[in-house]
Amino acid sequence: MLLINRMENASLTRIEKDIAQYIIEHKEEIEKLSTHAIAKGTYTSSSAVIRLAHKLGFEGYNDLKKRYLEEQAYLNSNFQNIDVNIPFSQDNNIMSVAGAIKEVMIES
């Protein structure tokens, strides 16, 4: 499961949900954001950011950030050119069709 889906679907406290939402909304800046910056942006603490990372199964925030960046790079490289009106061509294999359907479902 993608990290973004885990953050949206996990059983989190209100504070953890706020932190997760902040990370999702600031995905373009996440590489440069520290726990302190996220804590400041969410009016929480650095330790709350680290607790969220632990709750999601990571050793710490840097581990979570690394995984999030890897997923974003993968999604951007594989799904950036999908036209939701014409998402398939006849030479697509089954995996690319499945990926396109998934992306259309996420975007809609």
Image (tube, rainbow, N blue to C red):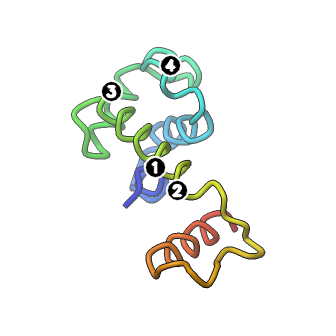
- The residue depicted at 44 percent of the width and 37 percent of the height is 69
Q: Position of residue 11 (x, y in %)?
A: 39, 55
- The answer to the question of whether label 3 and label 2 lie on touching residues, with beta carbons closer than 8 A, is no
- The answer to the question of whether label 1 and label 3 lie on touching residues, with beta carbons closer than 8 A, is no
- The residue depicted at 31 percent of the width and 46 percent of the height is 56
Q: Earlier in the sequence, mark 1 or mark 3?
A: 3
Q: Position of residue 80 (x, y in %)?
A: 63, 54
Label 4 crowd bin: few (<14), some (14–19), many (20+), radius 10 Å: few
As rendered, which of 85 and 17 lies closer to the eye? Answer: 85
**Which residue was labeled with disc 1?**
74
Helix, strand or loop at label 4? It is helix
Helix, strand or loop at label 2? It is helix
**Which residue was labeled with disc 4?**
32
**Where on the picture, by quarter, is residue 46?**
top left
Residue 12 shown left or right of residue 80 in the figure: left
- The answer to the question of whether label 4 and label 2 lie on touching residues, with beta carbons closer than 8 A, is no
- The answer to the question of whether label 4 and label 1 lie on touching residues, with beta carbons closer than 8 A, is no
Which amino acid, mark 4?
Answer: Lys
Residue 101 shown left or right of residue 62 in the figure: right
Which amino acid, mark 2?
Answer: Asn
Q: Which mark is residue 62?
A: 3
In three-dimensional space, the C-alpha distance between marks 4 and 2, rounded to whole angstroms, equals 23 Å
Picture quarter with the C terminus: bottom right
Q: Residue furthest left?
A: 59
**Which residue was labeled with disc 2?**
78
Residue 17 shown left or right of residue 103 in the figure: left
Which amino acid, mark 3?
Answer: Asn
In three-dimensional space, the C-alpha distance between marks 4 and 1, rounded to whole angstroms, equals 19 Å
